[in-house]
Amino acid sequence: MFIEDVDGNTFLDFTAGIAVASTGHCHPDVARAIARQAETLIHMSGTDFYYPLMARLAEKLAAIAPGDFPKRVYFGNSGTEAMEAAMKLARYHTRRHRFIAFMNAFHGRTFGSLSLTASKAAQRMGFGPLLSGVTHVPFPNPYRCPYPHSPGACQCDRLCVEFIENQLFRTQVPPEEVAAIVVEPIQGEGGYVVPPAEFLRRLRELADRHGILLIFDEVQSGMGRTGRMWASEHFGAAPDIIITAKGLASGLPLGVMIARADLMDWKPGAHASTFGGNPIACAAALETIRLLEEKYISNARRMGDYLLERLGGWAEKHPTVGDVRGKGLMIGIELVKDQKTRVPNPEARRQVAERAFEQGLLLLGCGESTIRLMPPLVVEQHHADFALDVLDRTIAESER
C-alpha cells in the first residue's frame, strides 16, 4: 500500500499504478511465483510453442469470464494490444468494417484503439487521420445526462441506445456494416462514470437485433476492482468479446482478449504476439487470480462500501463536491464550481491532488474534474480512514 521516493518520503498509494497493482506492491505470494518461474523458463513465445502455464491461465480465464459458452483466449502485453486484437477479430469474423464507441471512452493509444478513444482531444491530436468507420455516440452519465429531463426522471440508458437505433442507424451508419459496439461497463479515464443498471442489457439487445458483436473493455474495471471479478457482472450482461489487462498480473505486462470460441476462427498467422503470454507474466496472473478469488475481491466490495458510506454526505459538507459514484474500489469524486450549475472544477482537483501528495497520499484524476480512488485491493480500513481524512482536509482547503 505504500511507496517510498528517492528522498525517503513515504506515500499511501491510492492509484495502484493506474489500477494495476491489484494485490498491492510486491505481494509476497506473487513475488514468489515470479521468482520460481524466472528460475524455470523466462520466454518461449507461445505463438509457436505452447507451455503448460499458458494453457492453465487460458483455461482459468475462459472459466471466469462472463458468458455461459465456450471461449478462447488471446495473450498480448497490454490493454491496447488486447483492444487491437478484439477489433481485428471483430472485422475478420463479421466481414464488416464499422465500429461504434462512446464519447469520453478510453480504449488505448495505439492506432486502432486510439480511434475508439474519445476522452481527451490531446490524446488524438496530431495522429490523424485515424481509423475510418468509427462513430462515437453519447454514454449515459446520470450526473451529466446528455438528454434534458425533469429531476429524478433520467432515462439516459434508454435514450442513448435509442439514439443508435433510431438516429444513427437511420441516417448515417448502416447496421449491416457494423462489426462491433465497444464499451467500458464503467467508464475509466472518462470520469469513473457508472451507467444506469439497464444500459448494458439494452445494448446487448440492440447488438443481437442487428448481428453486431458486443465488446466489453474491462482493462481498468476488471479483475475484482468493483467488488466482482468483472464490472459487467453488476449489470447482468455478457459480451461476445471481453478484454482486460492492468490488474491481471499485479504489475507485470499482460493483456488478454477472451472471445466466444466460435468467433475466434481466424487462420494461423492472422494475429500473434511474440511476447504475449510470457511465462513469468502468466505465473503472476495465476497467483493474482488465486488471491483475488480467495480474499481480495470480497475485500474490494467491503472496503468500497465503507468508502462510499463515509463519502455519502460530502456533497452537503463540501460545496465543490458535485457527485460521488462508483462500485467497489473504483470510486469517483467529481468537483464542481457550483452544485447547481455543475460546471466542472479542474483547478480544484489539481489543488486537491497536489496538497494530498504533500500530505503523503497519492491520487490521480480522471474526466474533466473527477478525483478517482483506486487503491490496491488489499486496502484496509485504517488506510481508507487516512486517505479520506486527507481528502476531507484538502478539499476544504481548496474551498477557502
Image (spheres, rainbow, N blue to C red):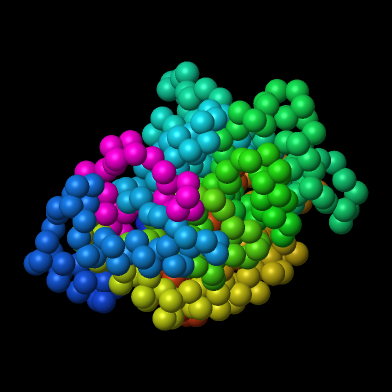
Q: In the image, what residue occupies the spot 47% across and 60% down?
A: 70
The residue lying toward the viewer, choosing from 271 and 151, is 271
Q: In the image, what residue occupies the spot 63% across and 65% down?
A: 234
Q: Residue furthest top?
A: 129
Tell whether 252 sits left or right of 181: left
Rendering coords of residue 107 (x, y %)? 48, 42
The relative height of residue 302 versus residue 6 in the rendered view (above or below) is below
The residue lying toward the viewer, choosing from 262 and 87, is 262
Rendering coords of residue 353 (x, y %)? 49, 53
Q: In the image, what residue occupies the spot 13% across and 58% down?
A: 42
Residue 254 visible in the current orientation? yes
The residue lying toward the viewer, choosing from 12 and 245, is 245
Q: In the image, what residue occupies the spot 61% across and 75% down?
A: 305
The relative height of residue 279 versus residue 263 in the rendered view (above or below) is below
The residue lying toward the viewer, choosing from 274 and 157, is 274
Tell whether 218 sits left or right of 325: left
The relative height of residue 311 versus residue 15 in the rendered view (above or below) is below
Instruction: Specify start and end residues of the magenta stretch as a single range.
Output: 250-277
Q: How many marks?
A: 0
Rendering coords of residue 383 (x, y %)? 45, 75
Which secondary structure class fits the magenta region best? loop
Rendering coords of residue 290 (x, y %)? 36, 75
Q: Residue furthest left?
A: 39
Q: Quadrant of the N terminus?
A: bottom left
Tell whether 68 sits left or right of 148: left
Residue 362 visible in the current orientation? no
Q: Residue furthest right?
A: 150
Q: Is residue 219 magenta?
A: no
